[in-house]
Amino acid sequence: MAFRALFLSVSLALACADPVAYKDCGSDVGKAAAVEVTPCPKIPCELHKGQSYSVNVTFSSYVESKTSKAVVHGIIAGVPIPFAIPDDDGCKSGIVCPIEKKSYSYMNQLLVKLEYPSLKLVVKWELVDDANKDLFCVLIPVQIVS
Ligand SMILES: *[C@@H]1O[C@H](CO)[C@@H](O)[C@H](O)[C@H]1NC(C)=O
């Protein structure tokens, strides 16, 4: 019984934050250190329509910046398609601005709408500074499923 409870709490803890194998797409003024998508127990992340996923990108900034803005694309068959997120202000997404030369965790939610097509794509998530340069740029492989 106690073992079962322990096992359950361990699996819940694991489900809480899944570090994903992402690709770094190169950034000028910072660098990603870790990406977590919750829940995403395996790659590509299976994104179920109607569900919301949290994205946590830990990165370090090499510059100071008053602002930060997220730029998200869905790359489908090699073609990047701009993807609007409800709030692209990084300073309202877990980052306390102004940004200093240190490490931050950027946090946002990804709502998978019911009308999205079921397909495999790569999510390209960038965060840009005052000068429109990338603080981080990550590629996360996902699969949208019903
Ligand atoms: C975001 O990820 C970092 C690095 O893995 C972790 O230290 C931090 O606690 C995470 N934040 C949240 C709210 O999960």
Image (cartoon, rainbow, N blue to C red):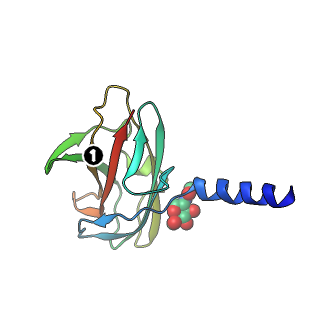
Which residue corresponds to the image point at 21% horizontal and 41% vertical from the top-left?
82
Q: Quadrant of the N terminus?
A: bottom right
Q: Answer above or below: position of 17 versus 92.
A: below
Question: Closer to the camera, 61 or 38?
Answer: 38
Q: Answer above or below: position of 42 versus 111.
A: below
Which residue corresponds to the image point at 30% horizontal and 31% vertical from the top-left?
116
Which residue carries the number 1 mark?
Answer: 120
Residue 134 position, x and y percent, is 25, 62
Which image quarter has ligand 1? Answer: bottom right
Tag 1 secondary structure: strand
Residue 106 sits in quarter: bottom left
Q: Answer above or below: position of 47 versus 3.
A: above
Q: Quadrant of the C terminus?
A: top left
Residue 139 sits in quarter: bottom left
**Does the rendering let one see residue 133?**
yes
Residue 109 sits in quarter: top left
